[in-house]
Image (tube, grey):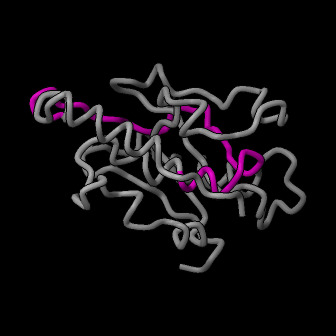
Amino acid sequence: AKPNDVVVVLDGDDRFLTKSTLFTIHNAYYNAPNSTNNNNNKNIWFTYGSNVGKFSEETRDIPPEYKNHSLPFQPRIDMPDWRYGHPRTFRAHLFAGLGKRDFSFSDGSFLVKATDRGFVYRLMELAGVDRIQFIRKVIYKYRWNNMTSTHKLIPRSIRQAQLRHVQLLAPSQKL
């Protein structure tokens, strides 16, 4: 991918809700508010969106006090509640800022819980609050299977330890 190409994260068991989902994502990047160049808006580096399904009511925009810089933007510290719903998208050049640490537990094993949080927090930190766009339009179907969810299969102590591990990772500086 070229550095400014857009990467879309689609979980294998989920789906786009409408045929216009990719168009909506495109508009978030290329026709975003405050865009100085609608043909190639480099001002948006990360988006997250609205979905239907379990936990969809938790997805919401970043509070204004972070957007207007009244408070420093530190999502893994200040906003531990999960508000960054599917789908998540980002500029390809941010991928270089990800490392094994964003997908691994302290013992080196891959995360089995909080698997999205490590890379989502990292990408948002690298992008900076000014280059993050919340997509309000519902464009994604999040599928939940109670029989195969981590809530059912992974002991609570492991889920909590891995979530805490991800929240305590050293944050990245905005690029």
Q: Position of residue 26 (x, y in %)?
A: 63, 55
| Mark count | 0
Name, please, the residue furthest toward the front.
107
In this picture, residue 114 sits left or right of residue 170: left
Residue drawn at 43 percent across, 55 percent down: 9
In this picture, residue 54 sits left or right of residue 65: left
Name, please, the residue furthest toward the bottom.
2
Residue interval drawn in magenta: 122-149
Where is 83 relative to 39, above or below? above
Q: Position of residue 53 (x, y in %)?
A: 35, 26
Give the quadrant of residue 129.
top right
Name, please, the residue furthest toward the top.
57
In this picture, residue 16 sits left or right of residue 11: right
Where is 34 relative to 72, above or below? below
In this picture, residue 126 sits left or right of residue 113: right
Q: Position of residue 143 (x, y in %)?
A: 27, 34
Residue drawn at 53 percent across, 53 percent down: 170
Where is 51 relative to 30, above or below? above
Say whether residue 32 is magenta: no
In which quadrant will I find the C terminus? bottom right
Residue drawn at 31 percent across, 57 percent down: 104
Residue drawn at 61 percent across, 64 percent down: 91
Q: Position of residue 158 (x, y in %)?
A: 21, 36
Say whether residue 132 is magenta: yes
